[in-house]
Amino acid sequence: AAARAGPAHAFALVDRALALAAADGASAAPAGVTLALEMQAAIAEETNDAASAAERQALVDALVPRLTDVLGTAERVFEACQASSSGSSADVRETGFESLRAAALHAALAWLKLDERGGGGIVLSPGQLASSRGGLLRGALACLGADDAATGDKATDFCVAALAYGAPPSPVPGEDESAVLGMIQALVASGQTAVGNAAAEDFARNICKVAVAVVERDASFAASASAPEACLALTSLVLSLAETHERGIMEACADYFLMLNTVSVADRHPGLRAPLFQRVLAACARHAAFPAGFTTWRDASEDRDAFHRFREQILVDVLDNCFGMCGITENGGGYLGFVLSQLETIASWQQAESALFLARAASSAAKRLVVRMRAAARERETESETREREGTEMFLRQTLSRIGDASPGSNPAPNSAVFASHPLVVAAAARVIGAYAPWLGHVAGRGDEGGVAIKCAAYLL
């Protein structure tokens, strides 16, 4: 209400909140600090909800000078938490600081985003935040792995906001870069405990969200040829989390790999090129698979729409990047070589369906390699373009021929029988045929390749 009454009343209420926090700061049960934090958060939220842009701007102009003072209240919470316990999650719960940490993060985030709705966004750059309230930033990073999920979520939101653009850069040269690097180092140091740890799913997700904010802020800083070692370690950590956790973690970190790929290959660190995306491809294949023991969606533990949305809206983009990076290699490797190897070593219908999904996900890029060129244009193609086209055509001949061999009424060979083994595999195979129909039409008049088109047509009947 004070914010709605105008800048002077809001300013006075901030003073009251700061005085209340200072008076109760040494208490073992700091109810006054909690109330002060709630008041601070309410002031910032009411400022963002001001009725007009002019009112909002007047409030922002009055309150921004108090920003570091207000953030100091939240910072002192983490200092008191550290002083009152060993810092372990159990001690934090026993001393009653868990709810206080959450309140501190909520208030700090509200003030950091004081002018979010007015278009100004974040009001402190990472360097300014680290230099003025470094204890708060370190406390937020430490809370990413909090046992209380709500506290971890608030810490994640705060760290993501701290990395967002909006505030003017620090006037101190290199201060923002140093602060971001410090955040990356903290993520890498603490995040190793989440790798392969099923009990740390929330922690892994929070790390990935903050890592995405790092590369969204400056992909070149994280991926260029001169990227700090900590940035390479962060990429390794994010990929390890994707490889060793469930689907939700892959969903959380997908944008990380998309942003890395916005840095040109020529300017990118050698460790962030094709071999990295070959590992990403393998992780995508695992997460694309239907759950083991799956029968029907009615009996499944996960939501059908969420599963398909993950594959069709998130994984497809990542896989398109993997195809672009891994391409076609002379030794049968690369993206399509990986799909072929998956189809050659099928251990379950889920693996077959996943491999077919990967084949379909690459169809847009793959078709451009084999359909676009007229004969005259092919005479001018480079050696690399010829290799890519021929490798893609070989993949399509082998894969679509195997699918066609499993057509109804046939006696398919063992390596083709899987394409008739489960209704979901049949549906996936039909979608692959549909995705590559332009190529099948393109080669329908050719000898052996025309036969592939006929067999695929029989499979669809």
Image: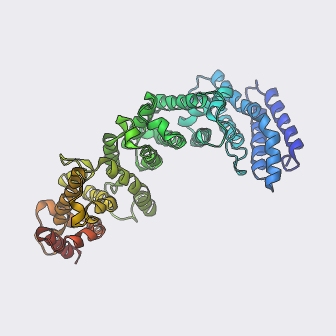
Seen in the picture, residue 49 relative to 451 is either above or below; the reply is: above
Quarter of the figure that contains the C terminus:
bottom left
Q: Is residue 322 left or right of residue 142?
A: left
Please state which of residues 355 and 228 is positioned toward the viewer in this rendering.
Answer: 228
Please state which of residues 95 and 381 is positioned toward the viewer in this rendering.
Answer: 381
**Residue 44, image x, y percentages:** 76, 44
Q: Is residue 172 left or right of residue 397?
A: right
Q: Is residue 2 left or right of residue 429?
A: right
Q: Is residue 4 left or right of residue 375?
A: right
Q: Residue at the location (45% across, 59% down)?
A: 306
**Residue 186, image x, y percentages:** 52, 29
**Residue 17, image x, y percentages:** 82, 35
Q: Residue at the location (22% across, 61% down)?
A: 378
Please state which of residues 173 and 305 is positioned toward the viewer in this rendering.
Answer: 173
Quarter of the figure with residue 271: top left
Q: Is residue 342 visible?
A: no
Q: Residue at the location (79% across, 50% down)?
A: 56
Please state which of residues 245 and 277 is positioned toward the viewer in this rendering.
Answer: 277
Please give the count of numbered marks on the rendered protein: 0
